[in-house]
Image (cartoon, rainbow, N blue to C red):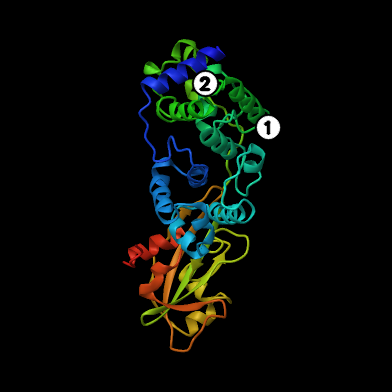
Amino acid sequence: MKSYFTRKIMAWNEGENTRKMPWKGEKDPYKIWLSEIILQQTRVEQGWSYYLKFIENFPTIDQLAKSPPEKVFKLWEGLGYYSRCRNLIATAQFIHTHYKDMFPTSHADVLALKGVGAYTAAAIVSFAYNQSYAVVDGNVQRVLSRFFGIETPVDSAKGKALYAALAQELLPAGRAGIYNQALMDFGAVVCKPQNPLCNNCPLRKKCIAFSESKVAILPVKEKKIKRSQRWFYYLVLRHKDTVYIRQRTGKDIWQHLYEFVLTEQPKKLPLEKLMRSPVCEIYFKNGTVSSVSEEYKQQLTHQTIHGQFIEIEIPYGFVPGDAFEKVKWKDLDRFAFPKLILTYLKEKNVNLS
């Protein structure tokens, strides 16, 4: 079964795999690392253009390491999960300082880099150096679960260990990089989560899920994501062609990105109640509400952010606090904002190119 599986995957890759990606076949560990960080929790279609932008702006790791963080965050803008961008910057600077811009070659050293887990480390060393480490992502787990009929939950400790061990056993000697990419491609275009191409699958003769009609229920997951609800009310304080913004700090979402004056409420509030709340009252008393937006929504992994924007025209000399800076409305494109605010600004016809 195992040799059959590996042989069929390699044959499919050589004869039928037409999946194209700009980083596919890449041997430069820097570019492989960059693509893998971008693709963490991101679809290939979305990450594609970001990868090209980063390679254009930072062709080498030293250029990334030496770039102002604000520029890196601006290029990352809209991709989400900004901890990845912080890790990207920190790791580039670490390699620049400790490895003199030479990407580490050992699996242990790559795994020790900030923001690099088992999957990313295996991808880098197998693709760049052809080292025998199996890459195990959701695509790989799905193919293995269906073909071998594994019902152990993929998100359990036992399941993760089982899939990792099995994937390692299946690696063909001396061809780890090609095989890893082929198996991930196979999961993406043939053994898909929904509507897999079972009738044209080269594995179907020995696929347990296919023979036992379990394709729709495999792989098994034991955990369901619970999402919290948060309500963000942004007070867009404007004076003629200027507006106040600040950079987010702390360990909450969107750290280092910019925002308007923000008040978070435990539940949805009508404007009348918001105006009377202690933290907002001073802004409404010193200004005039010019517009109130519809409710915007951004879905994160474990939380849903509900956002509303209240534009307030304030008098000259009114300052919301030391943390805020006054900028021209037309200059907002120089700052990196979370997707929620970007959506609002685009609808306000702010040039964010």
Residue drawn where x is 35% and y is 73% of the image: 330
Measured from the top left, where is residue 301 in percent x and y? 54, 47
Q: Secondary structure at mark 2?
A: helix
Measured from the top left, where is residue 115 in percent x and y? 60, 48
Q: Secondary structure at mark 1?
A: helix
Kindly tell me whether residue 20 is visible in this rendering.
Answer: yes
Q: Quadrant of the N terminus?
A: top right
Measured from the top left, where is residue 45 in percent x and y? 39, 42
Question: Looking at this view, is 88 or 252 the one in front?
Answer: 88
Q: Is residue 101 above or below residue 208?
A: below
Q: Is residue 296 above or below residue 4?
A: below
Q: Quadrant of the C terminus?
A: bottom left
In the picture, measured across the screen, residue 343 lies left or right of residue 83, that is left
Question: Looking at this view, is 294 or 132 the one in front?
Answer: 132
Mark 2 vs mark 1, CA separation in Å: 19 Å
Q: Mark 2, residues whose alpha carbon is within 10 Å: few (<14), some, or many (≥20)?
A: many
In the picture, measured across the screen, residue 188 lies left or right of residue 176, that is left
Q: Which mark is residue 157?
A: 1
Question: Looking at this view, is 102 or 323 the one in front?
Answer: 102
In the picture, measured across the screen, residue 202 lies left or right of residue 276, that is left
Residue drawn where x is 31% and y is 66% of the image: 349
In the picture, measured across the screen, residue 138 lies left or right of residue 189, that is right
Q: Which mark is residue 146?
A: 2
Q: Earlier in the sequence, mark 2 or mark 1?
A: 2
Q: Which mark is residue 218?
A: none
Q: Mark 1, residues whose alpha carbon is within 10 Å: few (<14), some, or many (≥20)?
A: few
Identity, as a three-letter code, of the amino acid under mark 2: Arg
Residue drawn where x is 44% and y is 25% of the image: 191
Kindly tell me whether residue 269 is visible in this rendering.
Answer: no
Q: Is residue 282 above or below residue 173?
A: below
Measured from the top left, where is residue 46 in percent x and y? 40, 46
